[in-house]
Amino acid sequence: MPTATFNSQQALPADADRATLVGRMWQPDVGPVLVAVHQGQLHDLSHIAPTASQLLELDVPVAKIRAALKDGSAPSLAALDDVLANSDEGLRDTEKPWLLAPCDLQAIKASGVTFVASLLERVIEEQARGDAAKAESIRTGLSSVLGDNLAGIVPGSPEAAKVKEVLIAQGVWSQYLEVGIGPDAEIFTKAPVLSAVGTGADAGIHEGSVWNNPEPEVVLAVNSQGHVRGAALGNDVNLRDFEGRSALLLGKAKDNNASCAIGPFIRLFDEHFGIADVRRITVGLQVTGPDGFEMEGASSLSKISRDPLNLVSQAIGRHHDYPDGLMLFLGTMFAPTQDRHGPGQGFTHMVGDWVTVSAPELGALTNRVVHSQQAERWTFGIGALMRNLAKRGLLGQQS
């Protein structure tokens, strides 16, 4: 059986020594604790902010964290490598701390069809009605019609409108093409507040799905004012057969127990890392299966059809308020087509797959695939968090 590695060398950014990394750690007998990475240790940020959401509301969160690390008011709680090793759900000692997803009260939103490469695959899903066996022939037919028609098209532009007219005339227009090159981006709710799992946790797929895949993405951490405070890695686990049968099944395709993974940390924007760096990130994907199957891929944000800040503006603004902020998946150009179970069958997960989403700027997020009902039950919701913070005297704390 394949295994995964969880240590700071694997999990942290290449320039971790100058990165401002924040996350959440489950501390036995305490609960979820906001932490910062510093010199191989995880430091308690509770006196700065009780939640990740509230931390991102501060005017200059990086300055607050640096000051606390310098004056000792953010004490060390645990060695990072020990916590990372214990984050592997299959080997976890529940008497010791482990990492959680780095977000908490933020809404978890996602952008769909933001890359031309994945746009084609969404159209294929729709045409195939969720049947993976039909995908290859449809892919060939659509490619002959679409060709490079969509390359370089700016969504919502006059040129995009002309392409739409041509494709309608050719009989290949699709709801996915509408959000891919039309003026309005697809922004949907990926998962409930507090339901995301962190690195090392099992990631869930619905047992009724026979065509599914990981979606390696950058996730922006946005506060209530619409300001992007940082970024993390995410896996927007997707059921291609469910969504392919009907776009109205998007909720079932996207939101299942443990089907959203974010981590390992949020890298806050500072003088070393900002939105310009996000635009250049290449997200890598590695899948290692219990059947010996291996797959690698990459998704470059430089090829995104909508700028990340445009997606933020479509997710939060005059029409959409998020008082606790949001985590926004930016989408992926990676839609795996590598055959796994036979010619023309494409890729689908097996229980036991290890999936690693990585980027030099953000580290690595690693999860093992299980059926959703086998994943750890999600029981710690908003009510539990409020009770926990009240018990610890942190409810209503404002730095």
Image (spheres, rainbow, N blue to C red):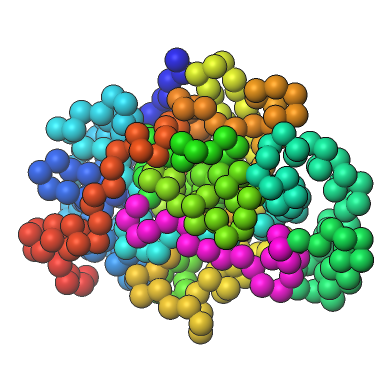
**In the image: residue 44, left or right of residue 54:** left
Which residue is depicted at the point 48% across and 62% down?
189
Which residue is depicted at the point 42% across and 32% down?
370
Quadrant of residue 223 in the image?
A: bottom left
Which of 7 and 115 lies nearest the eye of the viewer?
115
Quarter of the C terminus within the rendering: bottom left
Q: Is residue 8 visible from the viewing direction of this image?
A: no
**Is residue 194 rendered magenta in the image?**
yes
- Give the image location of residue 392, x and y in percent: 9, 58
Q: Is residue 365 above or below residue 256?
A: above
Q: How many marks?
A: 0
Which residue is depicted at the point 24% across and 61% down?
382
Which of 65 and 183 lies nearest the eye of the viewer?
183
**In the image: residue 119, left or right of residue 86:** right
Q: Which residues are magenta?
A: 175-195
Quadrant of residue 246 in the image?
A: bottom right
Q: Is residue 245 above or below residue 5?
A: below
**Is residue 124 rendered magenta in the image?**
no
- Give the image location of residue 233, x and y in percent: 49, 47
Quarter of the N terminus within the rendering: top left
Which of 298 and 44 lies nearest the eye of the viewer?
298
Which residue is depicted at the point 36% across and 75% down?
323
- Give the image location of residue 274, x and y in percent: 53, 59
- Give the image location of residue 59, x and y in percent: 36, 73
Q: Is residue 306 visible from the viewing direction of this image?
A: yes
Which of 227 and 107 lies nearest the eye of the viewer?
107
